[in-house]
Amino acid sequence: MPSKPHPFIPVNLPLLGGNERRYLNECIDTGWISSEGSFVKRFEMEFSELMGNRYGIAVSNGTDALELAIAALGIGPGDEVILPTFTIISCAQAVINAGATPVLVDSDPVTWNMQTDQVAAKITPRTKAIMPVHIYGLPVDMDPIINLAEKHGLYIVEDNAECIGQSYKGRPCGSFGHISTYSFYANKHVTTGEGGMVTTNDIKLDEICRGLRNLCFENPRFVHHRLGWNMRISNLQAAVGLAQVEQLEHFIEKKKAMGSRYTSELKDIAGISLPPSATDFAENIYWVYGIVLEDEIPFDAKTAIAMLHEAGIGARPFFWPMHEQPVFRDMGLFSGESYPVAEKLARRGFYPPSGLGLTEIDQERVITALKNILVSPGLGSCSHITGTTS
Ligand SMILES: *Cc1c(COP(=O)(O)O)cnc(C)c1O
Protein backbone atom coordinates (compact mmCIF):
# COMPACT_ATOMS: atom_id res chain seq x y z
CA MET A 1 0.00 0.00 0.00
CA PRO A 2 1.06 3.60 -0.55
CA SER A 3 3.88 4.53 1.77
CA LYS A 4 5.49 7.27 -0.36
CA PRO A 5 4.04 10.77 -0.28
CA HIS A 6 1.05 10.98 -2.56
CA PRO A 7 0.67 13.98 -4.85
CA PHE A 8 -3.12 13.70 -4.60
CA ILE A 9 -4.52 13.24 -1.10
CA PRO A 10 -7.30 10.68 -1.41
CA VAL A 11 -10.40 10.94 0.74
CA ASN A 12 -9.50 7.67 2.43
CA LEU A 13 -6.36 5.63 3.01
CA PRO A 14 -6.58 2.58 5.28
CA LEU A 15 -3.95 1.72 7.86
CA LEU A 16 -2.61 -1.83 7.50
CA GLY A 17 0.44 -1.76 9.72
CA GLY A 18 -0.33 -4.53 12.21
CA ASN A 19 -0.44 -8.30 11.78
CA GLU A 20 -2.31 -8.12 8.44
CA ARG A 21 0.64 -9.31 6.35
CA ARG A 22 1.62 -12.04 8.82
CA TYR A 23 -1.90 -13.48 8.98
CA LEU A 24 -2.30 -13.28 5.21
CA ASN A 25 0.96 -15.17 4.78
CA GLU A 26 -0.38 -17.81 7.15
CA CYS A 27 -3.41 -18.25 4.87
CA ILE A 28 -1.20 -18.62 1.83
CA ASP A 29 1.31 -20.91 3.51
CA THR A 30 -1.41 -23.24 4.79
CA GLY A 31 -3.65 -23.02 1.71
CA TRP A 32 -6.66 -21.97 3.79
CA ILE A 33 -8.11 -19.17 1.69
CA SER A 34 -11.86 -19.91 1.56
CA SER A 35 -14.45 -19.26 4.25
CA GLU A 36 -13.54 -22.61 5.83
CA GLY A 37 -10.29 -21.22 7.25
CA SER A 38 -9.85 -20.64 10.98
CA PHE A 39 -9.45 -16.84 10.77
CA VAL A 40 -13.18 -16.49 10.03
CA LYS A 41 -14.14 -18.02 13.38
CA ARG A 42 -11.45 -16.09 15.25
CA PHE A 43 -12.46 -12.81 13.65
CA GLU A 44 -16.15 -13.44 14.39
CA MET A 45 -15.39 -14.24 18.02
CA GLU A 46 -13.01 -11.36 18.71
CA PHE A 47 -15.12 -8.78 16.91
CA SER A 48 -18.52 -9.78 18.29
CA GLU A 49 -17.13 -9.84 21.82
CA LEU A 50 -15.78 -6.30 21.44
CA MET A 51 -19.21 -5.21 20.21
CA GLY A 52 -20.83 -6.71 23.30
CA ASN A 53 -22.45 -9.65 21.51
CA ARG A 54 -22.28 -13.42 21.91
CA TYR A 55 -22.48 -14.31 18.22
CA GLY A 56 -20.95 -12.86 15.07
CA ILE A 57 -21.63 -13.99 11.51
CA ALA A 58 -19.16 -12.53 9.02
CA VAL A 59 -20.47 -11.79 5.53
CA SER A 60 -19.24 -10.34 2.26
CA ASN A 61 -20.16 -6.68 2.94
CA GLY A 62 -22.27 -4.35 5.06
CA THR A 63 -25.08 -4.24 2.51
CA ASP A 64 -25.42 -8.01 2.72
CA ALA A 65 -25.31 -7.78 6.52
CA LEU A 66 -28.42 -5.55 6.44
CA GLU A 67 -30.18 -7.85 3.99
CA LEU A 68 -29.33 -10.84 6.17
CA ALA A 69 -30.55 -9.09 9.34
CA ILE A 70 -33.91 -8.19 7.79
CA ALA A 71 -34.40 -11.70 6.40
CA ALA A 72 -33.39 -13.40 9.66
CA LEU A 73 -36.02 -11.40 11.56
CA GLY A 74 -38.65 -12.58 9.10
CA ILE A 75 -39.50 -9.05 7.96
CA GLY A 76 -41.37 -9.16 4.66
CA PRO A 77 -44.38 -7.99 2.63
CA GLY A 78 -46.79 -5.83 4.60
CA ASP A 79 -44.19 -4.92 7.23
CA GLU A 80 -42.73 -1.48 7.86
CA VAL A 81 -39.28 -0.51 9.12
CA ILE A 82 -38.52 2.97 10.47
CA LEU A 83 -35.12 4.39 9.51
CA PRO A 84 -33.43 7.73 8.85
CA THR A 85 -33.77 9.29 5.40
CA PHE A 86 -30.15 10.46 5.77
CA THR A 87 -28.16 7.25 5.34
CA ILE A 88 -26.66 4.99 2.67
CA ILE A 89 -29.09 3.32 0.28
CA SER A 90 -28.19 -0.15 1.65
CA CYS A 91 -30.52 0.43 4.63
CA ALA A 92 -33.68 1.20 2.66
CA GLN A 93 -32.73 -1.27 -0.05
CA ALA A 94 -32.54 -4.16 2.43
CA VAL A 95 -36.09 -3.39 3.56
CA ILE A 96 -37.39 -3.09 0.00
CA ASN A 97 -35.63 -6.23 -1.23
CA ALA A 98 -37.43 -8.13 1.55
CA GLY A 99 -40.76 -6.85 0.19
CA ALA A 100 -41.29 -4.56 3.19
CA THR A 101 -41.69 -0.78 3.30
CA PRO A 102 -39.16 1.75 4.61
CA VAL A 103 -40.64 4.58 6.68
CA LEU A 104 -38.44 7.64 7.12
CA VAL A 105 -37.55 10.22 9.75
CA ASP A 106 -35.45 13.37 9.44
CA SER A 107 -32.02 14.10 10.95
CA ASP A 108 -30.94 16.11 13.93
CA PRO A 109 -29.33 19.34 12.64
CA VAL A 110 -26.38 19.08 15.05
CA THR A 111 -25.49 15.36 15.22
CA TRP A 112 -26.96 14.43 11.78
CA ASN A 113 -28.39 11.31 13.42
CA MET A 114 -32.05 10.32 13.14
CA GLN A 115 -34.43 12.52 15.14
CA THR A 116 -35.64 10.02 17.69
CA ASP A 117 -38.63 12.19 18.65
CA GLN A 118 -40.05 11.69 15.14
CA VAL A 119 -40.11 7.91 15.46
CA ALA A 120 -43.19 7.49 17.69
CA ALA A 121 -45.48 9.26 15.19
CA LYS A 122 -44.34 6.88 12.43
CA ILE A 123 -45.27 3.67 14.28
CA THR A 124 -48.28 1.86 12.82
CA PRO A 125 -49.74 -1.63 13.36
CA ARG A 126 -47.49 -2.73 10.46
CA THR A 127 -44.24 -1.55 12.03
CA LYS A 128 -41.89 -4.46 12.69
CA ALA A 129 -38.57 -2.80 13.38
CA ILE A 130 -36.65 0.39 13.97
CA MET A 131 -33.30 0.72 12.24
CA PRO A 132 -31.09 3.27 13.99
CA VAL A 133 -28.01 4.13 11.91
CA HIS A 134 -25.13 5.75 13.77
CA ILE A 135 -23.98 8.50 11.44
CA TYR A 136 -20.39 9.65 10.81
CA GLY A 137 -19.03 8.69 14.26
CA LEU A 138 -21.66 9.83 16.77
CA PRO A 139 -24.25 7.40 18.14
CA VAL A 140 -28.01 7.74 17.81
CA ASP A 141 -29.74 8.57 21.11
CA MET A 142 -30.66 4.94 21.80
CA ASP A 143 -32.75 5.19 24.99
CA PRO A 144 -35.88 6.58 23.27
CA ILE A 145 -35.52 3.92 20.54
CA ILE A 146 -35.20 1.12 23.09
CA ASN A 147 -38.24 2.41 25.00
CA LEU A 148 -40.39 2.58 21.86
CA ALA A 149 -39.24 -0.85 20.71
CA GLU A 150 -40.12 -2.38 24.08
CA LYS A 151 -43.45 -0.59 24.29
CA HIS A 152 -44.56 -1.66 20.81
CA GLY A 153 -42.81 -5.03 20.58
CA LEU A 154 -40.51 -3.97 17.74
CA TYR A 155 -37.13 -5.29 16.68
CA ILE A 156 -34.09 -3.05 16.65
CA VAL A 157 -31.75 -3.49 13.69
CA GLU A 158 -28.73 -1.42 14.61
CA ASP A 159 -26.58 -0.36 11.66
CA ASN A 160 -23.20 0.18 13.26
CA ALA A 161 -21.09 0.42 10.09
CA GLU A 162 -19.92 3.93 10.99
CA CYS A 163 -19.47 3.59 14.75
CA ILE A 164 -17.31 0.49 15.18
CA GLY A 165 -15.48 1.04 18.48
CA GLN A 166 -17.95 3.72 19.63
CA SER A 167 -20.13 3.47 22.70
CA TYR A 168 -23.39 5.02 23.88
CA LYS A 169 -23.46 5.92 27.58
CA GLY A 170 -20.54 3.56 28.07
CA ARG A 171 -22.12 0.55 26.36
CA PRO A 172 -20.71 -0.59 22.99
CA CYS A 173 -22.54 0.49 19.84
CA GLY A 174 -23.63 -2.72 18.18
CA SER A 175 -24.94 -4.14 21.48
CA PHE A 176 -28.36 -2.48 21.16
CA GLY A 177 -29.83 -4.36 18.22
CA HIS A 178 -31.66 -7.68 18.26
CA ILE A 179 -29.37 -7.88 15.27
CA SER A 180 -26.62 -5.34 14.59
CA THR A 181 -24.78 -4.90 11.33
CA TYR A 182 -21.30 -3.72 10.35
CA SER A 183 -19.32 -2.96 7.22
CA PHE A 184 -15.61 -3.57 6.80
CA TYR A 185 -15.25 -1.55 3.63
CA ALA A 186 -11.85 0.13 3.22
CA ASN A 187 -12.96 3.37 4.89
CA LYS A 188 -14.54 1.84 8.00
CA HIS A 189 -12.87 1.76 11.43
CA VAL A 190 -12.09 -1.92 10.88
CA THR A 191 -11.53 -3.02 7.30
CA THR A 192 -11.21 -6.28 5.40
CA GLY A 193 -11.24 -4.49 2.02
CA GLU A 194 -14.78 -5.66 1.44
CA GLY A 195 -16.66 -7.39 4.22
CA GLY A 196 -19.32 -7.14 6.88
CA MET A 197 -20.83 -8.85 9.90
CA VAL A 198 -24.04 -9.26 11.81
CA THR A 199 -23.95 -9.77 15.57
CA THR A 200 -26.63 -10.94 17.98
CA ASN A 201 -27.10 -12.40 21.44
CA ASP A 202 -29.89 -14.68 20.22
CA ILE A 203 -28.74 -18.22 19.47
CA LYS A 204 -31.76 -18.81 17.19
CA LEU A 205 -30.94 -15.74 15.10
CA ASP A 206 -27.31 -16.85 14.96
CA GLU A 207 -28.36 -20.19 13.55
CA ILE A 208 -30.74 -18.62 11.01
CA CYS A 209 -28.06 -16.17 9.88
CA ARG A 210 -25.46 -18.92 9.46
CA GLY A 211 -27.90 -20.84 7.29
CA LEU A 212 -28.94 -17.88 5.14
CA ARG A 213 -25.30 -16.82 4.66
CA ASN A 214 -24.41 -20.18 3.21
CA LEU A 215 -27.24 -21.14 0.80
CA CYS A 216 -29.15 -22.83 3.64
CA PHE A 217 -27.09 -25.98 3.29
CA GLU A 218 -28.36 -28.69 5.60
CA ASN A 219 -27.83 -32.34 6.29
CA PRO A 220 -27.93 -34.13 3.89
CA ARG A 221 -25.96 -31.60 1.88
CA PHE A 222 -27.54 -30.37 -1.37
CA VAL A 223 -31.09 -30.90 -0.10
CA HIS A 224 -32.59 -27.51 0.79
CA HIS A 225 -35.71 -26.44 2.66
CA ARG A 226 -35.11 -22.74 2.30
CA LEU A 227 -33.36 -20.30 -0.03
CA GLY A 228 -30.46 -18.22 1.18
CA TRP A 229 -27.47 -16.50 -0.35
CA ASN A 230 -23.77 -16.98 -0.70
CA MET A 231 -22.65 -14.13 1.56
CA ARG A 232 -19.53 -15.89 2.83
CA ILE A 233 -16.31 -14.04 3.66
CA SER A 234 -12.92 -15.52 2.79
CA ASN A 235 -10.23 -16.52 5.26
CA LEU A 236 -7.97 -13.91 3.58
CA GLN A 237 -10.40 -11.13 4.46
CA ALA A 238 -10.94 -12.44 7.99
CA ALA A 239 -7.16 -12.60 8.49
CA VAL A 240 -6.97 -8.88 7.72
CA GLY A 241 -10.01 -8.28 9.92
CA LEU A 242 -8.49 -10.01 12.92
CA ALA A 243 -5.31 -7.96 12.60
CA GLN A 244 -7.46 -4.82 12.36
CA VAL A 245 -9.49 -5.67 15.46
CA GLU A 246 -6.24 -5.96 17.42
CA GLN A 247 -5.60 -2.29 16.60
CA LEU A 248 -9.11 -0.90 17.09
CA GLU A 249 -8.34 1.02 20.26
CA HIS A 250 -5.38 2.72 18.58
CA PHE A 251 -7.51 3.45 15.50
CA ILE A 252 -10.16 5.19 17.60
CA GLU A 253 -7.49 7.34 19.27
CA LYS A 254 -6.11 8.26 15.86
CA LYS A 255 -9.53 9.21 14.55
CA LYS A 256 -10.23 11.36 17.60
CA ALA A 257 -6.91 13.16 17.13
CA MET A 258 -7.65 13.72 13.44
CA GLY A 259 -11.08 15.15 14.29
CA SER A 260 -9.85 17.40 17.09
CA ARG A 261 -7.19 18.79 14.83
CA TYR A 262 -9.67 19.67 12.10
CA THR A 263 -11.94 21.29 14.67
CA SER A 264 -9.26 23.38 16.34
CA GLU A 265 -8.02 24.62 12.94
CA LEU A 266 -11.44 25.28 11.39
CA LYS A 267 -13.60 26.38 14.32
CA ASP A 268 -13.11 30.11 13.77
CA ILE A 269 -14.17 30.07 10.14
CA ALA A 270 -17.53 31.83 9.79
CA GLY A 271 -20.42 30.19 7.96
CA ILE A 272 -19.60 26.53 8.47
CA SER A 273 -20.89 23.91 10.89
CA LEU A 274 -18.51 21.29 12.22
CA PRO A 275 -19.28 17.99 13.95
CA PRO A 276 -19.62 18.25 17.74
CA SER A 277 -16.64 16.73 19.52
CA ALA A 278 -19.02 15.10 21.99
CA THR A 279 -22.70 14.72 22.89
CA ASP A 280 -24.28 13.74 26.20
CA PHE A 281 -23.78 10.10 25.17
CA ALA A 282 -20.37 9.83 23.53
CA GLU A 283 -17.22 11.43 22.24
CA ASN A 284 -17.07 11.70 18.46
CA ILE A 285 -14.92 9.04 16.78
CA TYR A 286 -15.19 10.75 13.36
CA TRP A 287 -15.84 7.97 10.91
CA VAL A 288 -15.64 10.92 8.56
CA TYR A 289 -15.13 14.58 9.42
CA GLY A 290 -18.20 16.30 8.02
CA ILE A 291 -18.43 20.00 7.21
CA VAL A 292 -21.72 21.77 6.47
CA LEU A 293 -21.79 25.07 4.58
CA GLU A 294 -24.28 27.51 6.07
CA ASP A 295 -26.26 30.02 4.01
CA GLU A 296 -23.61 32.75 4.18
CA ILE A 297 -21.22 30.60 2.14
CA PRO A 298 -22.10 31.47 -1.47
CA PHE A 299 -21.55 27.98 -2.91
CA ASP A 300 -22.71 24.45 -2.22
CA ALA A 301 -20.92 21.21 -1.31
CA LYS A 302 -20.50 20.20 -4.94
CA THR A 303 -18.51 23.37 -5.63
CA ALA A 304 -16.44 22.98 -2.46
CA ILE A 305 -15.55 19.43 -3.50
CA ALA A 306 -14.56 20.63 -6.98
CA MET A 307 -12.34 23.34 -5.48
CA LEU A 308 -10.65 20.84 -3.15
CA HIS A 309 -10.12 18.52 -6.07
CA GLU A 310 -8.42 21.35 -7.91
CA ALA A 311 -6.12 21.72 -4.91
CA GLY A 312 -5.18 18.03 -5.13
CA ILE A 313 -7.45 16.87 -2.34
CA GLY A 314 -10.18 14.27 -2.39
CA ALA A 315 -13.54 15.02 -0.79
CA ARG A 316 -16.99 13.46 -0.85
CA PRO A 317 -20.54 14.74 -0.58
CA PHE A 318 -22.82 13.72 2.27
CA PHE A 319 -25.53 11.10 1.76
CA TRP A 320 -28.39 11.91 -0.59
CA PRO A 321 -31.65 11.36 1.33
CA MET A 322 -33.76 8.29 0.64
CA HIS A 323 -36.92 10.32 -0.04
CA GLU A 324 -35.12 12.14 -2.87
CA GLN A 325 -33.75 9.02 -4.56
CA PRO A 326 -35.01 8.76 -8.14
CA VAL A 327 -35.14 4.97 -7.89
CA PHE A 328 -37.54 5.13 -4.93
CA ARG A 329 -39.60 7.96 -6.42
CA ASP A 330 -40.02 5.77 -9.53
CA MET A 331 -41.41 3.04 -7.25
CA GLY A 332 -43.97 5.53 -5.91
CA LEU A 333 -42.30 5.70 -2.52
CA PHE A 334 -42.10 8.80 -0.29
CA SER A 335 -44.13 11.00 -2.64
CA GLY A 336 -44.84 14.41 -1.16
CA GLU A 337 -42.56 13.74 1.81
CA SER A 338 -40.04 16.34 2.86
CA TYR A 339 -37.26 16.18 5.46
CA PRO A 340 -35.65 19.62 5.47
CA VAL A 341 -32.62 18.86 7.63
CA ALA A 342 -31.54 15.92 5.49
CA GLU A 343 -32.20 17.95 2.33
CA LYS A 344 -29.89 20.67 3.55
CA LEU A 345 -27.19 18.23 4.69
CA ALA A 346 -27.22 16.59 1.26
CA ARG A 347 -26.66 19.87 -0.56
CA ARG A 348 -24.38 21.67 1.88
CA GLY A 349 -22.40 18.85 3.50
CA PHE A 350 -19.10 17.26 2.44
CA TYR A 351 -16.11 15.63 4.05
CA PRO A 352 -12.40 16.08 3.43
CA PRO A 353 -9.86 13.24 3.80
CA SER A 354 -10.64 11.52 7.11
CA GLY A 355 -9.10 8.06 6.78
CA LEU A 356 -6.84 6.34 9.27
CA GLY A 357 -3.93 6.59 6.85
CA LEU A 358 -4.08 10.41 6.67
CA THR A 359 -0.68 11.72 7.80
CA GLU A 360 -0.28 14.90 9.83
CA ILE A 361 1.59 16.50 6.93
CA ASP A 362 -1.23 15.70 4.52
CA GLN A 363 -3.84 16.91 7.00
CA GLU A 364 -1.94 20.20 7.19
CA ARG A 365 -2.28 20.54 3.42
CA VAL A 366 -5.98 19.77 3.63
CA ILE A 367 -6.50 22.38 6.37
CA THR A 368 -4.65 25.03 4.35
CA ALA A 369 -6.78 24.28 1.29
CA LEU A 370 -10.00 24.38 3.34
CA LYS A 371 -9.05 27.77 4.76
CA ASN A 372 -8.29 29.08 1.28
CA ILE A 373 -11.68 27.95 0.05
CA LEU A 374 -13.80 28.88 3.05
CA VAL A 375 -12.30 32.10 4.40
CA SER A 376 -13.84 35.08 2.62
CA PRO A 377 -15.33 32.90 -0.07
CA GLY A 378 -17.04 34.23 -3.15
CA LEU A 379 -13.98 36.20 -4.22
CA GLY A 380 -13.78 34.22 -7.39
CA SER A 381 -13.59 30.72 -8.71
CA CYS A 382 -10.97 28.12 -7.98
CA SER A 383 -8.10 30.32 -9.14
CA HIS A 384 -7.13 31.58 -5.71
CA ILE A 385 -6.33 28.13 -4.40
CA THR A 386 -4.34 26.60 -7.22
CA GLY A 387 -1.09 27.55 -5.52
CA THR A 388 -1.66 24.89 -2.89
CA THR A 389 -1.53 21.86 -5.15
CA SER A 390 2.07 20.87 -4.52
C1 LIG B 1 -20.68 1.52 4.61
C2 LIG B 1 -22.07 1.40 5.10
C3 LIG B 1 -22.91 0.34 4.72
C4 LIG B 1 -22.62 -0.59 3.59
O1 LIG B 1 -21.51 -1.34 3.70
P1 LIG B 1 -20.82 -2.00 2.42
O2 LIG B 1 -19.80 -2.89 3.05
O3 LIG B 1 -20.21 -0.91 1.62
O4 LIG B 1 -21.86 -2.76 1.67
C5 LIG B 1 -24.14 0.22 5.36
N1 LIG B 1 -24.54 1.12 6.26
C6 LIG B 1 -23.79 2.17 6.60
C7 LIG B 1 -24.32 3.14 7.59
C8 LIG B 1 -22.54 2.37 6.01
O5 LIG B 1 -21.81 3.44 6.32
Image (cartoon, helix red, strand yellow):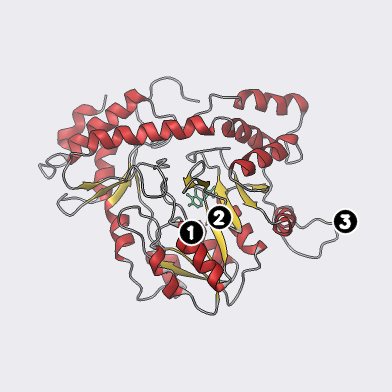
Instruction: Name the residue rendered at 80%, 55% in the picture.
Output: 217
Instruction: Name the residue rendered at 77%, 29% in the picture.
Output: 31
For residue 219, the mark is 3
Which corner quadrant holds the C terminus?
A: top left
Whichever of labels 3 and 2 marks the residue nearer the N terminus, that label is 2
- Kind of residue at disc 1: Pro
Whichever of labels 1 and 3 marks the residue nearer the N terminus, that label is 1
- Say which residue label 2 marks: 176
Whole-percent x, y for residue 254 in the image: 43, 30
Task: Give the SS element for disc 2.
Answer: loop
The answer to whether mark 2 and mark 1 are in CB contact below 8 A is yes
Q: With 170 as the anchor, is 307 left or right in this view?
A: left
Say if 328 sits above or below 287 in the image. below
Which residue in the rendered view is the most extreme toward the right? 220
Task: Give the SS element for disc 1.
Answer: loop
- Say which residue label 1 marks: 132
Mark pair 1, 3: CA separation: 37 Å
Crowding around mark 1 (Cα neighbors within 10 Å: few <14, some 14 to 19, many 20+) is many
Q: With 316 as the anchor, is 227 left or right in this view?
A: right
Q: With 197 as the anchor, is 115 left or right in this view?
A: left
Which of 205 and 50 lies nearest the eye of the viewer?
50
Whole-percent x, y for residue 137 in the image: 42, 45
- Kind of residue at disc 3: Asn
Whole-percent x, y for residue 38 in the image: 75, 35
Does the residue tagged 3 have its C-beta within 8 Å of any atom of ligand 1?
Answer: no
Which tag is nearer the camera, tag 2 or tag 1? Answer: 2
